Structures are given as structure tokens and as C-alpha cells.
């Protein structure tokens, strides 16, 4: 095995429970190729604390520190995995649907898949006007 590169498992930051992991994988797959945090636990604590009060729509997504230019893609990937895991837990707890739905009044209810894309692409572009 000498000379072989160490490869990290792509699901390393997703939840361990198989059913929740499957949801997180589907959500992460929706945002993994979008244009590109160092502390997964801190991101999870932040997301849990902020989402209850502010919701998802009032956050701006991941903000780059260009002094660490070479690490930006890896940091974005980690952040997106953590976000996918958070959303997957909400889906597994039946607190959020995976896909957009219409309620009894005909009103649309956002799904985790749409929220994942918004967090990774739509909201940062809107906040930073890019």
C-alpha cells in the first residue's frame, strides 16, 4: 500500500443513521457541483441555534475568507455536507418534506431539496449581489 493516497469517505460528515444518511446524500448531491468552515460541530451548533429563530431564508450561506483561497472548495464541501445532514434530520423527524409540497390551502411549502440549493447558491448570490 505504500505510495497510495489516503481517500476520505464522501459520507464522512453525514449522519450515521442509514435512513437519515440516505436523505442527506440526496440533498448533498443536489448542491455538490454548485460553484464553491473549518469546524463541522460549530456549523451544526450555529444552524441549530439560528434556524429556529431566523429560519433558512435569513441566512446568507457560506462566506469565503480569500486569505485561505486554496482551502475554499474543501470548506464549501464540508459546509454543504453539514447543511445536508441538518436538513436530513428535519426530514427524518417529519418536520420538513424532502420535496416542495402544496398544503391544504394550496400554499406551497418549501422542501429540503429546494432549501439546500437556496443555502448553497441562491441566497449567497442575492445577499452579495453576484
Image (cartoon, rainbow, N blue to C red):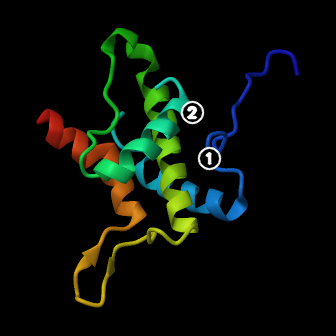
In the image, 6: left or right of 20?
right
Q: Which mark is residue 14?
A: 1
- 64 is higher (above) or lower (below) than 45: above
Q: Say which residue appears at 47% left-offset and 68% top-offset.
A: 95
Q: Quadrant of the N terminus?
A: top right
- 82 is higher (above) or lower (below) than 16: above
Q: Quadrant of residue 24?
A: bottom right
Residue 88 on image: x %, y % = 53, 59
Residue carrying label 2:
41
Residue 35 on image: x %, y % = 33, 37
Residue extending furthest toward the right: 1
Mark 1 neighbour class, 10 Å CA radius: few under 14, some 14 to 19, many 20 or more:
many
Residue 62 on image: x %, y % = 34, 33
Q: Say which residue appears at 37% left-offset and 49% top-offset.
A: 51
In the image, 2: left or right of 33?
right
Nearer to the camera, 35 or 40: 40
Q: Count the marks: how many? A: 2
Name which of mark 1 and mark 2 comes first in the sequence.
1
Residue 63 on image: x %, y % = 31, 28
Amino acid at each position: 500500500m505504500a505510495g497510495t493516497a489516503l481517500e476520505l469517505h464522501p459520507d464522512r460528515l453525514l449522519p450515521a443513521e442509514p435512513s437519515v444518511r440516505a436523505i442527506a446524500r440526496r440533498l448533498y448531491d443536489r448542491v455538490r457541483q454548485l460553484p464553491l468552515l473549518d469546524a463541522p460541530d460549530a456549523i451544526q451548533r450555529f444552524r441549530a441555534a439560528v434556524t429556529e429563530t431566523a429560519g433558512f431564508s435569513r441566512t446568507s450561506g457560506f462566506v469565503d475568507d480569500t486569505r485561505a483561497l486554496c482551502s475554499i472548495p474543501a470548506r464549501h464541501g464540508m459546509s454543504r455536507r453539514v447543511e445536508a445532514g441538518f436538513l436530513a434530520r428535519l426530514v427524518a423527524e417529519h418536520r420538513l418534506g424532502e420535496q416542495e409540497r402544496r398544503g391544504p390551502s394550496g400554499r406551497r411549502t418549501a422542501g429540503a431539496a429546494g432549501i439546500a440549493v437556496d443555502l448553497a447558491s441562491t441566497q449567497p448570490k442575492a445577499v452579495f449581489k453576484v
